[in-house]
Image (cartoon, rainbow, N blue to C red):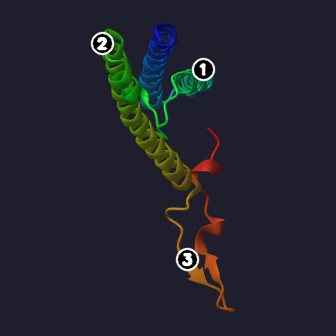
Amino acid sequence: MTNIVQYLIKVLKTEIKHLERTLDLLKQKEKMLIKNDTKGLEEVIHNEREMFIALRDIEDSRRSIIELFVSRYNIKEKVVNLSRIAELIGGDEGSKLEELRGRINVLINTINRQNEKCAVLLRKSIELTDFSIRLLSGALHSKKTYSKKGIIGNEMTSKKIILDYKA
């Protein structure tokens, strides 16, 4: 049992390192959104993609190890997770698994909160950009009128807007 558990512990430690790196990337993303640094944001997003691919592979490894553990030790339960494995093996290894599981849960919750912050910043940035475009194009100050046929028209079509002037 020890070899499988040691390998599982190794995989979990690798997963934690990748989750910590993902959290760092999300914090960088937040800074880039605040600075409105699109080039830096593109680089962070590229690194995030690579990290997600690596995390997916690590998660697949973890699932395979757990399946191997279940089949090798003839566990009949439908759902076997890290907590249950820690409980079954007990001792120092069980404690270590439980500690790593807790650390992973904390990191995932922190990543979710950081992701939500970035999503809010992104929405606000889009709203500001949309507002600026409408302001510059005159859409915010157009007066709607009706033509003789009852069709809504725009009174300001003959007036110049900010975008019409040369710098």
How far apart marks 1 and 3 lie (CA) works out to: 55 Å
Q: Secondary structure at mark 2?
A: helix
Residue nearer the viewer, 144 or 125: 125
How dense is the environment of label 3, judged by Cα within 10 Å: few (below 14), some, or many (20 and up)?
Answer: few
The residue labelled by disc 1 is: 54
Q: Which mark is residue 91?
A: 2
133 relative to 7, above or below: below
Q: Is residue 27 left or right of residue 139?
A: left
Q: Residue at x 46, y 8 (%)?
A: 2
- Rendered image quadrant of residue 64: top right
How dense is the environment of label 1, judged by Cα within 10 Å: few (below 14), some, or many (20 and up)?
Answer: some
Residue nearer the viewer, 72 or 55: 72
Q: Residue at x 62, y 22 (%)?
A: 57
- Type of the residue with mark 3: Lys
Q: Tell which circle, 1 or 3, labels the residue nearer the N-terminal end.
A: 1
Q: Is residue 144 left or right of residue 28?
A: right
Q: Tell which circle, 2 or 3, labels the residue nearer the N-terminal end.
A: 2
- Rendered image quadrant of residue 24: top left
Q: Which mark is residue 144?
A: 3
| Disc nearest the viewer among 1 and 3 | 1
- Type of the residue with mark 2: Gly
Q: Tell which circle, 1 or 2, labels the residue nearer the N-terminal end.
A: 1
Residue 163 pos. (x, y %) = 62, 49
Residues at marks 1 and 3 touching, judged by CB atoms closer than 8 Å = no
Look at the image and tell me in which quarter the C terminus lies: top right
